[in-house]
Amino acid sequence: MGKRGKKELIDAAAVELFATKGLNGSTVKDIAAKAGVSEGALYRHYKSKEEMAQMLFQAEKNKLNGAIFSILGSSCRADQKINDVVSYIYGEYKKSPYNILFLTTNFHQLNSTIEVFSYTENIYDMLIYFLKDFFGKYSPEKDHQLAATLMVGIVMEPIVFHHYKRLEKHPVEYVEQISSICCQLFGVRNEEF
């Protein structure tokens, strides 16, 4: 197995453990054992567990944010943008559950340690930007920060509940319902955006 193969194994093992056991509950020894590599192999790629968590979190966040930014920047209606964002997130969770769960369960702890340079690097800030622009046009009295907070909760909590078996169906089966709830809550109708 080449050096790149080992790093991919380490990264996948770390993301799974961070997602399921948390950062404090995961050790370098656990990650190395799950990846089937020595602890030394892990240290050839990362200086520490904390650096690994931050780098993996940043990479996953960049991937998710890039896709969401592209969706929110499209020329379709606001309701369609919301539906497309929800569909994308749940599709990614179905394809790579630990990656999305890692972001969801570690967002506050790791996001505060990573320097953010623009709103495109943070899903919460992107939603504030999107909602502020939307509400500025159609409903300026709305509190865009509260709206973004609620939207993140409405979209991301079904992932956590599904993981802990408190939501039987996979969130991908709720895309239309969740999108509709977000649209209703924020007064988003078939408006061009």
Image (cartoon, grey):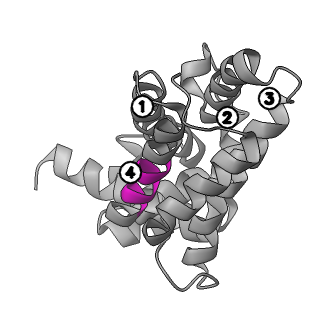
Front residue of 29 and 24: 24
Does label 1 or label 2 sit earlier along the sequence? Answer: 1
- Which residue has dot 1 on it? 71
Q: Is residue 62 magenta?
A: no
Q: Tell whether position 88 is magenta.
A: yes
Q: Is residue 188 left or right of residue 112?
A: left
Q: Position of residue 43 (x, y in %)?
A: 41, 45
Asked if residue 14 shows in the view, the reply is: no
Q: CA distance from mark 3 to mark 4?
A: 42 Å
The residue most toward the front is 190
Picture residue at 85% right of the left edge, 29% below the top:
142
Q: First in sequence: mark 1 or mark 3?
A: 1
Q: Nearer the viewer, mark 4 or mark 1?
A: 1
Write the start and end of the magenta stretch as one range.
Answer: 86-93
Q: At label 2, which amino acid type do we have?
A: Tyr
Position above or below: 45 against 97: above
Q: Secondary structure at mark 2?
A: helix
Residue marked by disc 3? 144
Q: Three-letter amino acid code at disc 3?
A: His
